[in-house]
Amino acid sequence: MVKRLVWFVGGIAAGVLGMGAAKKKVKTVANELAPVQVVKRTSRSLRSGVDHIGDAVREGKRAMSAKETELRARRDGRLSTLTDELSDVDTVFVDGHPVEPGQVIVLRQMPDKNAAQPRARRRA
């Protein structure tokens, strides 16, 4: 009989403690999901992400400008591709392996117009 009473009292104690912990957790989560807290968290997130968004916008504009320049050059006939220069019987080799002409990308380094030019030294 005493054994059953100990288990009964232990079960009641565990239930009361469990309910208290669950109630505390529910209140915490409900407070985090309150509209005011969601707005605060979102505004913090947006403020910290503005720099990344600005970088992405600048990169997107740069890529858009480069593609527009390429399309205008192609339209005006100032741009030619490797496929335009080859006949059907020609083969393109890269490192000794034949490849399709459309798989080849040739990059040309252009001088940076915005780079500071070195100044000439004057003799005293």
Image (cartoon, rainbow, N blue to C red):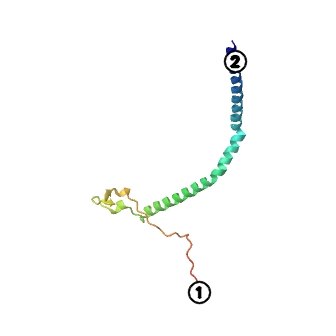
Nearer to me, 61 or 98: 98
Under mark 1, the amino acid is Arg
Looking at the figure, which quarter contains the C terminus?
bottom right
Under mark 2, the amino acid is Val
Nearer to me, 119 or 76: 119
- In the image: residue 102, left or right of residue 4: left
Please tell me which residue is depicted at 65% across the width and 51% down the height of the picture. 48
Q: Position of residue 11 (x, y in %)?
A: 68, 20
Question: Is 105 located above or below residue 124 in the figure?
Answer: above
Question: Is 87 located above or below residue 123 in the figure?
Answer: above
Q: Position of residue 21 (x, y in %)?
A: 70, 30
Looking at the figure, which quarter contains the N terminus?
top right
Nearer to me, 73 or 47: 47
Viewer-nearest of labels 2 and 1? 2
Q: In the image, which disc is placed on residue 123?
A: 1
Residue 74 quadrant: bottom left
Q: In the image, which disc is placed on residue 85?
A: none
Q: Position of residue 104 (x, y in %)?
A: 38, 59
Please tell me which residue is depicted at 71% across the width and 24% down the height of the picture. 16
- In the image: residue 59, left or right of residue 101: right
**Residue designated by label 2:** 6
Question: At numbered mark 2, what does the secondary structure look like: helix, strand or loop?
Answer: helix
Q: Position of residue 91 (x, y in %)?
A: 29, 59
- In the image: residue 121, left or right of residue 29: left
Question: Is 38 located above or below residue 49 in the figure?
Answer: above
* Residue situated furthest bottom in the rendering: 124
Question: At numbered mark 1, what does the secondary structure look like: helix, strand or loop?
Answer: loop
Q: Are marks 2 and 1 in contact (CB under 8 Å)?
A: no
Question: Is 34 located above or below residue 102 in the figure?
Answer: above
Separation (CA) of disc 2 from disc 1: 101 Å
Nearer to me, 123 or 108: 123
